[in-house]
Structure formats: structure tokens, C-alpha cells
Image (spheres, rainbow, N blue to C red):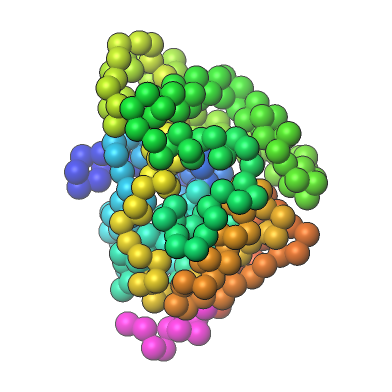
Amino acid sequence: METPDGRRLAVDWWGPVDGYPVFLLHGTPGSRQGPRPRTRDLHLLGLRLIAYDRPGYGGSTRYPDRQVIHAAADVDAIARELGIGQFSVVGRSGGGPHALACAARLPDKVASAAVLVSLAPFDAKGLNWFDGMTASNIEAYQQAKARGGDLRGLRDRFWDRGKAISGDPGQMIASLSPELSVPDRRIVMEIGVSRMLVDNFRGAFTSADDHHRARDEWTTPVDADDEESAAYGSEGWFDDVVSFTRPWGFDVEDIETPVLLWHGELDRFSPVGHFHWLAEHLRNCTPMMAPGSAHFGAVQALPRVLRWLVDETREAAPTRS
């Protein structure tokens, strides 16, 4: 579909067309083809699950210099296009901040939200943002908060990785392996989960051969240069990471929508301190800490989380317009 400002968004949905609409916001990096419950389970839940590629991933046009809050306008545009009034949102990992953005910007439309293994705002007071985080994430986020040459290095790093992953999506999983906790390694090694993750990364990083564009078309906060084309997905990955280290465009404390907050206590990609900070600052929060679970435990928790969204919406229905 086309957004009001002329960008292209790639959108898919699963489940009954008359089911209760829930937007699933993918992780970082990721795509609309990311992990989700089976269609049969969506029918049993009575849910219509809607997902889209964030700008710069897969089939969606890049939105240069986007903030986290900008996701709300895209979700709203998709809802309007599909004729949807009220809905819920769920975001996993990098989709978590974007789900919170929807709850903050669209309070009359978002009936409930669920946020799984999310980061907290970079400027969160009292939070040691990097404590307990994997070395690769620390390196990327420290580069992202910089300016000039350091930011160019991050851009080039994601550019090269995106081109490689577009040719072999499985290598993204292999690259994560050294930093996976025991619970995460066990989940990622499951054939079903592994296939979903490969589909996720394949959808995010479309082939560079399909998108021959000069690197000077990739407008970034640093000066561009004239080099080879890169895969879609590198842009979205870069923009996600940079946006997480910039002001999000809203205050978490202002969100009044009911939010389920799920986190694995052993998470190294979004450390547990982020969960505790969000739980303390969200006004209407149901926190769920999963002992013995880590980051990818959110994939297995998603069906239960969707059930919570359904139940929460049904309970609130008599008091909401």
C-alpha cells in the first residue's frame, strides 16, 4: 500500500478477516514474515494478525531519519486502508518501542498493547542502559549515538552484513550463536523456530540484485558517497538502531493504554533492567517475568500474549467507545 506521504509499505495479514485485529511489529532486524502463531491458532483465537515491513526493510520504502514515534502513523495508515477502527498492537524485541509508540500516539484506537523483550528509552533516568547487554549490541548502539565518521562506520557495517544475509539468511542465526544464552540456543535450534527466523531474515534482506540503487540514494545523517547498491534491510536495520538511541518522540509515562510487559530474566540482547524500568514507568502495566527464559523465549510466549490481548480487550469493551 502507499502511505499519505507517498512511501510504499509491504503488508500481510493472517487469520479470519472478521477476527479482532492485532498488529504484530517485528524485531530488529526483521520483517513481516517473522515468527507468528500458526494460522489455525489465529482462527481459534479469533484474531486477524497484521504485519508490515518497517521502512527500509523488505518491501517498504525507507523513511530517512525516522523516530520511533513515526511507526504510529504507518500503523494508523494501514488500519485506515483496511477499514479497521480499534485494534491492539504487539511488539517483540525491536518492535517493542514501536508498539509503545502506537499506544502513546493512538490512544483512542489502540485498545491494548503487549511488549515483549523490549528496550527502554536510551535516556531513561536511573537505568544503566548497557548493563548486561551483549558485546555486539553495545558496540552497535555506542556507534549509533555518535556522529560523523563513527556513524558512517555503523552504516557500512550494516550495509555489508545486509548484502551477505540477503544471499544466506541462515548466517544471521549463526552469527548470533556465540552470544546466545543456553535457553535461547535451545529455542533457536528447534527446527520450527529456526525456519521462522530464516524466513524473517529472508523477508527483511531482499536480494541486492533486486534493488540496484547507488549508495548515494541511501540518504543518511552523514554524507553519502557513490558506491555499489545494497540490499534492502540494511537501511531499516541502521535506522532502527539509530532511532533507539535518539529521543523516541513520546514519554512512556504518558501511556494510559493497558500494556502487557513480558521479559525473559536471562535476556542478554534487551537486558532485564530495561524491563524493570518500563514496569516502573508505564501507568497501566501488567508485568510478566519469565524465570529461566531469555530473548527468544518471546517467540514461544507470543500465543499466550495474544490470548491476553483478546481477554483484555473483551473485558474493557463495555467501557470503551
Left or right: residue 61 compared with residue 263: left
**Which residue lies at the image location 54% right of the left edge and 35% below the top edge?**
139
Which residue occupies the extreme top position in the image?
227
Q: Which residues are magenta?
A: 312-321
Residue 20 visible in image: no
Image quarter hosting the N terminus: top left
Give residue 28's position: percent from left, percent from top: 51, 42
The reply to whether the magenta stretch includes residue 317 is yes
Left or right: residue 81 compared with residue 276: left
**Which residue lies at the image location 41% right of the left edge and 89% below the top edge?**
318
Give residue 151's position: percent from left, percent from top: 39, 29
Which residue occupies the extreme left position in the image?
5
Closer to the camera in the image, 26 or 249: 249
Give residue 214's position: percent from left, percent from top: 31, 15
Query: Magenta stretch mostly in which secondary structure?
Result: helix
Answer above or below: position of 176 versus 133: above
The reply to whether the magenta stretch includes residue 319 is yes
Closer to the camera in the image, 306 or 223: 223
